[in-house]
Amino acid sequence: MDGVTQFLRFTSFANFTWGHLVMLAIGCLFIFLAIKKEYEPLLLIPIGFGILIGNIPFFENVGLQIGIYEEGSVLNYLYFGVTKGIYPPLIFLGIGAMTDFSALLSNPKLMLLGAAAQVGIFLTFMAALVLGFTQEQAAAIGIIGGADGPTAIFLSSRLAPELIGAIAIAAYSYMALVPVIQPPIIKLLTSKEERVIRMKPPRSVSKLEKILFPIVGLLLTTFISPGALPLLGMLFFGNLLKESGVTKRLSDTASKAMIDIVTILLGLTVGASTQATTFLTPQSILIFVLGAVSFAIATAGGVIFAKVMNLFLKGDERINPMIGAAGVSAVPDSARVVQSLGLKEDSSNYLLMHAMAPNVSGVIGSAVAAGILMGFLLKAV
């Protein structure tokens, strides 16, 4: 009977709490949205299933070494890549190898929209300070507004490792919900006349420009924000692999097999980090609320700045202000949202390539913002 009693103590039924039920329901919701609604399935399915894995209750602190927070467990070893910021630069390498910066190079002024969208990061940083978070925690929470999961994980691993789980889940959740969150904000801030503005076709970009861009871009951005070097260095390196034309095998590996493997590990471990006994707290809920505010402000900031730019532009130089919403770095979902809204207003107005310019500049902008925050807040040894 002693053996039976011990066995029962070790089952999930004996260690089950209402918090586990809540998190299991959230994991199932993520999987449902990924499959039924096709909201970022490559992210939400690994994260959703990771939430299920992380919330199978077990008898803690007895040396089973199965929980993600138990030193020596397999999940803990895999989670090392999150807590030490290893996975995000590898994700950026893959993004760089997949990204075509031609739209940005053909119309460089659209880079300003990507910069304007980062206003959400800094306003949310100040709001989090008011709500009682430390400077380091506030910075890590604010970066959610960039809608860039890898950057959010990287910055929180440096400044607020205790919040990685909540920040990562919030960042990736809002990335997946871009088609739900952004359209109402865009429509609220733009008129029918503005939404049907046609932009002139992008100019052709030479091969030399494409090769020089990652080199010049690396030097300019990292000299300003050295803290972003691990992210931007890998981003521009991946892009050079793609544009050089002589490293196709390396480019294909970075943009396909490698980024897929890292995405699986990142999504699964981030999901598993939502273990109810440590994750389900009022602080986590507040982070989700602040993340939503940050993302909404970032979207609005890009749209409003595009409207301001139009005050100084004439004729076919004018910008469709909807593309300002793509300044958040949810690549390429924000650009697709703009394309979809544009086609609803005018079935022959294609905005995707124009929207990709602020979209990819948003990736760079959020990484630069993260580096700037690190430069201000990291304590010198």
Image (cartoon, helix red, strand yellow):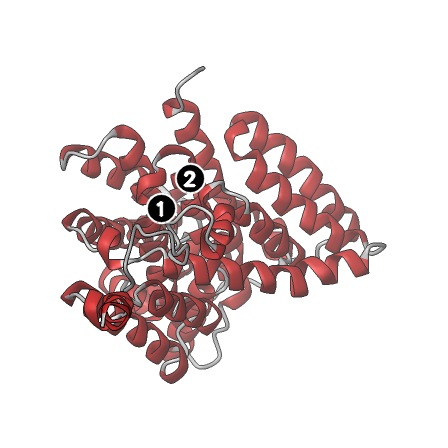
Badge 1: residue crowd in 10 Å (few <14, some 14–19, many ≥20): many
- Classify residue 46 by image quadrant: bottom left
Name the foreground residue: 153 vs 371: 153
- Residue located 41% across and 79% down the image: 38
Give the residue number, with chain letter if any, for mark 2. 157
- Type of the residue with mark 1: Ile
Residue 58 appears in the picture as rendered: yes
Kind of residue at disc 2: Ser
Q: Secondary structure at mark 2?
A: helix
Helix, strand or loop at label 1? It is: helix
Q: Which residue is mark 1?
A: 164
- Distance, label 2 to label 1, CA atoms, is 6 Å
Q: Residue at x 50, y 72 (%)?
A: 350
Q: In x, y percent, where is residue 367?
A: 48, 41
Instruction: Give the camera-side residue of 106 and 86.
Output: 86
Residue 222: % across, % down: 58, 31
Vertical order, 324 against 332 (above or below): above
| Residue situated furthest front in the rendering | 1
Q: Is residue 94 left or right of residue 301?
A: right
Taking the view exactly as shown, the residue that stands out farthest to the bottom is 36
**Residue 194: percent from left, percent from top:** 34, 63
Q: Which quarter shows the N terminus? A: bottom left
- Pointers 2 and 1 in contact (C-beta within 8 Å): yes
Residue 206 visible to the viewer: no
Q: Residue at x 37, y 67 (%)?
A: 53
| Count of numbered circles in the view | 2
* Front one among 21 and 231: 21
> Mark 1 or mark 2, which is nearer the start of the sequence?
2
Tell me residue 347's x, y (percent): 44, 82
Q: Residue furthest right?
A: 246
